Image (spheres, rainbow, N blue to C red):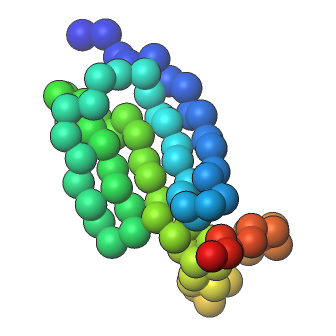
């Protein structure tokens, strides 16, 4: 069985405050929404594409959780919340 081509392409849409991560070049079969995350899967059940809604809020909360747990601190984020 051939594996999907790995790409790891990341993009951010400021107006919508959505962070998108393309993990592989494979057709999307279905998606699951888990809170602010929408994870798109291939027919084989492998994650292909991830969308993080309200990305600036998600990343701030993630950073706080990591610091609180003593895992590591992300570099200071410079994302501005969308206006309008």
Q: Residue at x 35, y 17 (%)?
A: 3
Pick out the residue farthest to the bottom: 68
Image height of 22 relative to 50, above or below: above
Q: Quadrant of the C terminus?
A: bottom right
Between 46 and 13, the one lying in front of the other is 13
Q: Residue at x 65, y 71 (%)?
A: 82
Tell me, yes or no, if residue 7 can be seen here. yes
Q: Quadrant of the N terminus?
A: top left
Q: Residue at x 62, y 44 (%)?
A: 11
Q: Is residue 56 rendered to the left or right of residue 34?
A: right
Image height of 32 relative to 83, above or below: above
Q: Position of residue 68 (x, y in %)?
A: 62, 89
Tell me, yes or no, if residue 72 can be seen here. no
Between 17 and 50, the one lying in front of the other is 17
Give the image quarter of residue 16.
bottom right
Q: Is residue 84 rendered to the left or right of residue 25?
A: right
Pick out the residue farthest to the front: 84
Q: Residue at x 47, y 60 (%)?
A: 52
Across the whole image, how many numbered discs are drawn on residues?
A: 0
Q: Position of residue 4 (x, y in %)?
A: 38, 19
Pick out the residue farthest to the top: 2
Image height of 20 relative to 33, above or below: above
Q: Position of residue 51 (x, y in %)?
A: 44, 52
Q: Position of residue 50 (x, y in %)?
A: 42, 48
Between 53 and 3, the one lying in front of the other is 53
């Amino acid at each position: 069985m051939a594996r999907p081509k790995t790409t790891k392409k990341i993009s951010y849409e400021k107006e919508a405050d959505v962070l998108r991560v393309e993990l592989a070049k494979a057709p999307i079969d279905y998606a699951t929404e888990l809170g602010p995350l929408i994870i798109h899967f291939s027919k084989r059940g492998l994650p292909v594409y991830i969308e993080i809604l309200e990305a600036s809020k998600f990343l701030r909360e993630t950073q706080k959780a990591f610091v609180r747990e003593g895992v590591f601190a992300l570099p200071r984020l410079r994302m501005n919340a969308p206006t309008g």
